[in-house]
Amino acid sequence: MDRNYWDSLADCYEGNLLEIAREDQTGALGEELEALGGEGVRVADLGCGPGSLLPLLARHFEKVIAVDYARQLLDRARQRCRSRKVSYACHDLSRGLELPFQVEVACCINALIDPDSGRRLGMLRSLRSAMRKQGVAIIVVPAFESVFHVYHTLRRIRERSGTPEGLSAEEAERLMGAELQSFTDGIVRVGGTPTKYWMREELMATLAEQNLDVRRIRKVEYPWTEEIENPPGWLEGAQPWDWLVVCEA
């Protein structure tokens, strides 16, 4: 997963990758950002991609620093958010180098997805360097548990209604086996691209190793249509989700 890969997504990012700012069903991320924002509060969007979060950040914070290492995605972010509050910087966060700024709030929204653990830890070290003393980080990652929830739900759909949108037990086993590149590492192929998914306890332990204290962890739920074509109307209960963690230095 390199710079050329992310640059290649610039023109079709919205269609290829879930944008939490758009699909968050309960407004969990917006709620957390609004509570942390205010006059004089600076925020960094680390791994900002095409800038889907920037308009929201510019609304709640006095200064926004958008960081990515894919230049075409940064160009798209500039086009998307022209607020004077926002500045842009190109850094390879995965190298783990100290960033040349510090902020009160650091956001890392579905950026910790590289299958290489060393690159993910590098990103966390860079994030930690950008946090002022007693600063806060908001981190969102794909939930590994949600993958199993989706396949279990697909089996329920087949068992209840027999529709082709569901899966038999054999189909679910085969398809999930093909999608999971590594069960123990939490690596899932998304559109053929190996992507890191996180378990709740794994995420909390990893943050603790970086001297980040977890304040709270909650779900960011998104629509079933992101996972299932034509989901049945009777489908209720927990939706697919990502993990959202609020932690402090």
Image (cartoon, rainbow, N blue to C red):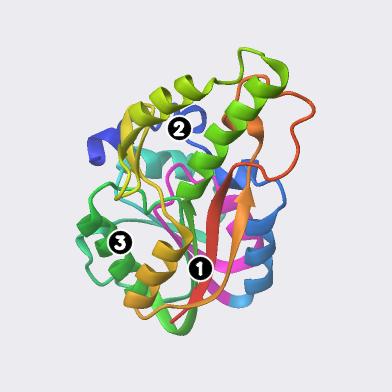
Q: Are marks 2 and 1 in contact (CB under 8 Å)?
A: no
Write down the quadrant of residue 25 in the picture: top right
In the rendered view, tell whether residue 211 sits above or below residue 112. below
Q: Are marks 3 and 1 in contact (CB under 8 Å)?
A: no
Tell which of 121 and 179 is nearer to you. Answer: 179
Tell which of 184 and 87 is nearer to you. Answer: 184
In the rendered view, tell whether residue 62 sits above or below residue 194. below
The residue depicted at 58 percent of the width and 47 percent of the height is: 241
| Range of magenta residues | 41-65
SS type, badge 2: helix
Q: How far apart are marks 2 and 3 (CA)?
A: 21 Å
Location of mark 1 (residue): 43
Residue 198 seen from this side: yes
Residue 196 % position (x, y): 35, 47
Specify the label residue 13 is tagged with: 2
The kind of residue on which mark 2 rests is Tyr
SS type, badge 3: helix
Question: Which comes before the other along the chain, label 3 or label 1?
Answer: 1
SS type, badge 1: strand
Location of mark 3 (residue): 123
Tell which of 162 and 237 is nearer to you. Answer: 162
Tell which of 176 and 218 is nearer to you. Answer: 176
The kind of residue on which mark 1 rests is Val
